[in-house]
Image (cartoon, rainbow, N blue to C red):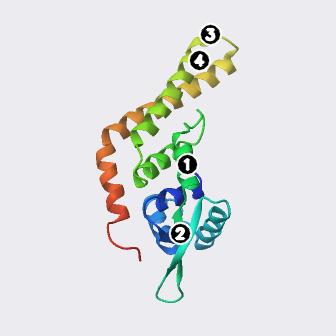
Amino acid sequence: MTVPMALLALLDGRPSHGFALKRRYDDLLGHDRELRFGQVYATLARLERDGLADGIGLERGDGADRKVYAITADGVAELDRWLAAPQLPGGRPAELFTKVILALAAHRSADAVLDAQRAVYLARMRELTARRGEGDAVDRLARDFEMAHLDADLRWIELAVARLADVRDGVDTALGGGPDE
């Protein structure tokens, strides 16, 4: 999972300052580790430098004024590209989970993310099945290991599809409908 893509997804349709982005990131994805403020602001500076986000003004805060950022058209295109790119088999499953949550947060199709991933996993399983009897015992065990992980990931995808409406509601609730703090 990349923090830049997460921030772009959280900016999509909802310009925000760094403090609000950190809070929303932590609420959605910070279960294992919260985002550091320094990482938020450094990432926003890189996104702005790369033309993926723009500083669109200042918002009065409790102390200093807060710079408000918005996603650019290039940022939207980059976010869409990242969401549409299936994770290669053997990648980190946490990235798929993150893509689903961020697709929902950015009002994109989580179904499309899951469908694309399912297709890649099924194609890889077909490749592995076609080579089932090939190689020595170590090769066969490695293929069985990969098949078991692919099977588990496919079962998770089906579970995610079945729960998508509830997850969408949870993401909407986590993001809240009120103004940023």
Which label sits in the foreground, 1 or 4?
A: 1
Give the number of the disc on residue 69.
2
Q: First in sequence, mark 3 or 1: give its number.
A: 1
Q: Which residue is mark 3?
A: 133
- First in residue order: circle 2 vs circle 4: 2
Distance in Å between CA atoms under marks 1 and 4: 32 Å
Query: Sequence order check: which comes first, mark 3 or mark 4?
Result: 4
Marks 3 and 4, Cα distance to the nearest angstrom? 12 Å
Q: Are marks 1 and 4 in contact (CB under 8 Å)?
A: no
CA separation in Å, label 2 and label 3 = 55 Å
Q: Residue furthest bottom?
A: 63
Point out which mark residue 179 bears.
none
Residue 141 rendering spot, x and y as whole percentages = 62, 22
Question: Regarding mark 1 in the picture, which secondary structure is present there?
Answer: helix
**Amino acid type, residue under disc 4 in the picture:** Glu
- 2 and 3 marks in contact (CB < 8 Å): no
Of 148 and 92, the residue lying toward us = 92
Residue 52 figure quarter: bottom right
Q: Secondary structure at mark 4?
A: helix
Three-letter code for the amino acid on which mark 3 is drawn: Gly
Q: Which residue: 43% across, 64% down?
A: 14
Query: Mark 2 vs mark 3: which is more N-terminal?
Result: 2
Task: Give the residue pinned by disc 4.
Answer: 127
Give the distance between the C-alpha atoms of the residues marked 3 and 1, in whole angstroms. 43 Å
Q: Position of residue 19 (x, y in %)?
A: 50, 74
Instruction: Give the number of the mark in front: 3 or 4.
Output: 4
- Left/right of residue 168 with respect to residue 46 in the rendered view: left
Tag 1 residue: 77
